Image (spheres, rainbow, N blue to C red):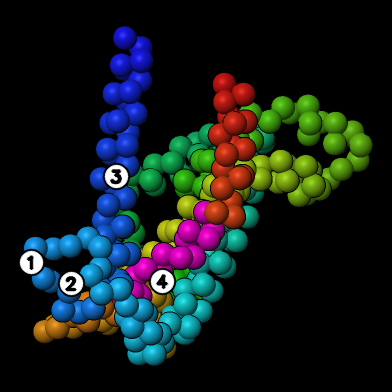
Amino acid sequence: MKNVKGVAVHVLLFALAFIWIFPVIWLVLSSFKDGSELFTYPLTILPEHFTLENYKTAWEQFDLMLYTGNTAFITVVATVITVIMSSMCGYGLAKYNYKWLNILFLCLLATTMLPTEVIMSPSFTVLNALGLYNSLWGCVIPTVGTMTGVFLMRQFFISVPNELMESARIDGASEGQIFTRIMFPICRPQIAILAIFSFQWRWNDYIWPLLALSDPKKYTLQLALRTLSGAEAVNWTVLLSTAVLTMIPILIVFIIFNKQIMNANMSSGVKG
């Protein structure tokens, strides 16, 4: 009976995984089809005439390096600042025993219940007042404060024994040294998880760059992809191949930090 249940669970999981991955597979395979083959009926999954011409055209017609550079700057800078800010804030909320900190944490946690659209107008007003409109920094600064990262780091630091801090203080370490030399290094798995999430959020962000940028030379990849969809026609071959290229950095980041995520899962299992 247990074997039957185990097989049923695995079949269900594989089915759900296939449902999730199938559109991605279709996207990748369609990027190797020519334009006439995309809309033939009946539709075929595998390309009948495999071609790399779509990627060549995308590389020649689409200023991929410019848009990738803009997106990479926003994503990397925002991710680094997000990790540092979330770690420091999570550490302070977890390890300093002030009553008002709990109230502050609840207030910060309540902001997660606000839809992003609600805070866009005041955020844009502040951004414009600071002179950051139509600037890449205008896409960085409003996005670095994420309560998800603060909550993740706070929950980890709560699990770290206070005796570790007290021993460091006895040895003469300052508060800054305790954080930078002891606390920050031991949360590498959580940093890896937050870095992947932040990288994905910023790399795929569309709404905020749409509001903050007006110069086409400062467009991110997601905004540039929109330009391939005209009011009367869509360049599907270039659009599909460029969309596939934009997924590659996310896969690279996940592969690099995959080991750290596995270590985080194992350590959380041991603590439980």
Question: Where residue 176 sits in the image (x, y, percent)?
Answer: 78, 49
> Which secondary structure, mark 4?
helix
Along the line of sight, the residue nearer the viewer: 146 or 123: 146
Question: Where residue 88 sits in the image (x, y, percent)?
Answer: 64, 49
Dividing the image into 4 quarters, which one contains the N terminus?
top left
The residue that label 4 is drawn on is: 245
In this view, the mark in front (1 or 3): 1
The residue that label 2 is drawn on is: 38
Cα separation, mark 4 vs mark 1, equals 27 Å
Find residue 219 and report its image quarter.
bottom left
Disc sitting over residue 41 in the figure? 1
The residue that label 3 is drawn on is: 18
The span picked out in magenta is 239-254
Dominant secondary structure, magenta: helix
In this view, the mark in front (4 or 2): 2
Question: Where residue 3 sits in the image (x, y, percent)?
Answer: 36, 15
Disc 1 marks a residue whose amino acid type is Tyr
Disc 2 marks a residue whose amino acid type is Leu
In this view, the mark in front (4 or 3): 3
Q: Earlier in the sequence, mark 3 or mark 2?
A: 3
Q: Earlier in the sequence, mark 4 or mark 1?
A: 1
- Outermost residue toward the right? 171
**Which residue sits at x=17%, y=62%?**
44
**Which residue sits at x=42%, y=59%?**
201
Disc 3 marks a residue whose amino acid type is Phe
Mark 1 packing: few (<14 Cα in 10 Å), some, or many (20+)?
few
Disc sitting over residue 127 in the figure? none
Cα separation, mark 4 vs mark 3, equals 22 Å
